[in-house]
Image (cartoon, rainbow, N blue to C red):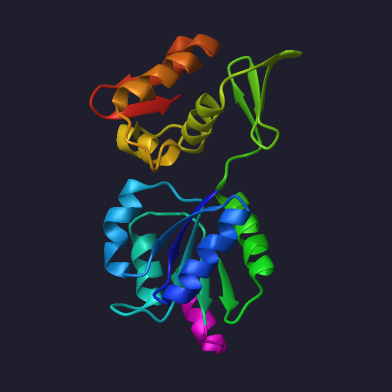
């Protein structure tokens, strides 16, 4: 899982990032919310976590802007604001959950995991004669289990999440290799691996743009 954390409290942000890493949750942390437009283009997130009281704008405005931009990623609010009116505003703008500070880190992780499932596709996906179980990370053709590499699985999962959309190469690179200097050729190599398994026309190439799972 990868989350975006928008939190200007550097001690809390650093602590949360370390704690989430223990639970195998990658955190992209912004303590300056003005970097959001570029960050949201660069990465694919499972959950966005937003503090309401920030330096340059409010969390409520960020939630509203994300929803108006068509971003449907689940949003979890973390804040010291406890009034019902504050909650009503956040939910009306498009927030999915609301957690008041101070909070238990274990509960925080549980809420993240629950929210991440809201966005994800059904756990069982059919592609031609293949049955894909997202939760179990398995692919079956009839009774036969088909094996692919972990990286090819990550790429397949991303394409399934975005099925019907063109997924640009930069999105693929940042999702699968976020901290590595790799180029388009490695994406082509794993697309080729998937095409050896699935019908070749199921993944369409858009030169200079990206790939689409039909």
86 magenta-colored = yes
Q: Residue at x 31, y 61 (%)?
A: 36
Residue 50, position in %: x, y? 45, 69
185 sits left or right of 123 in the view: left
Q: Is residue 95 something one can see in this rendering?
A: no
Compared to residue 111, the image places residue 178 above or below, namely above
Which quadrant holds residue 210? top left
Residue 128, position in %: x, y? 58, 16
Mainly helix, strand or loop, the magenta region?
Answer: helix
Q: Is residue 6 something one can see in this rendering?
A: yes
Residue 4, position in %: x, y? 44, 58
161 sits left or right of 125 in the view: left
Which stretch did the figure color magenta?
80-91
70 magenta-colored = no
Compared to residue 143, the image places residue 6 above or below, namely below
Q: How many marks?
A: 0
Task: Identify the residue at the far right of this view.
Answer: 143
Q: Residue at x 63, y 54 (%)?
A: 23
Compared to residue 207, the image places residue 162 above or below, namely below
Q: Residue at x 63, y 77 (%)?
A: 103
Q: Residue at x 66, y 31 (%)?
A: 137
| Depth order, front residue of 48/23 | 23
Task: Identify the residue at the far bottom of this view.
Answer: 83
């Amino acid at each position: 899982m990868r989350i975006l954390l928008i939190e200007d409290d550097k001690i809390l942000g650093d602590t949360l990032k370390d704690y989430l890493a223990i639970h195998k949750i990658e955190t992209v942390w912004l303590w300056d919310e003005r970097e959001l437009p570029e960050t949201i283009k660069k990465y694919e997130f499972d959950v966005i976590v937003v503090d309401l009281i920030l330096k340059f704008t409010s969390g409520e405005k960020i939630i509203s802007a994300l929803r108006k931009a068509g971003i449907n990623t689940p949003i979890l609010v973390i804040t010291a604001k406890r009034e019902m009116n504050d909650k009503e505003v956040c939910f009306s703008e498009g927030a999915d959950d609301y957690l008041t500070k101070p909070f238990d880190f274990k509960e925080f992780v549980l809420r993240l995991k629950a929210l991440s499932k809201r966005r994800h596709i059904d756990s069982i996906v059919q592609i031609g004669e293949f049955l894909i179980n997202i939760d179990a990370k398995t692919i079956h053709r009839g009774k036969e289990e088909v094996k692919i590499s972990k990286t090819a699985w990550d790429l397949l999962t991303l394409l399934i999440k975005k099925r019907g959309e063109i997924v640009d190469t930069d999105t693929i690179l940042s999702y699968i290799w976020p901290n590595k200097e790799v180029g388009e050729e490695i994406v082509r190599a794993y697309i080729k691996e998937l095409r050896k398994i699935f019908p070749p026309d199921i993944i369409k190439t858009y030169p200079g743009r990206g790939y689409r799972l039909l």
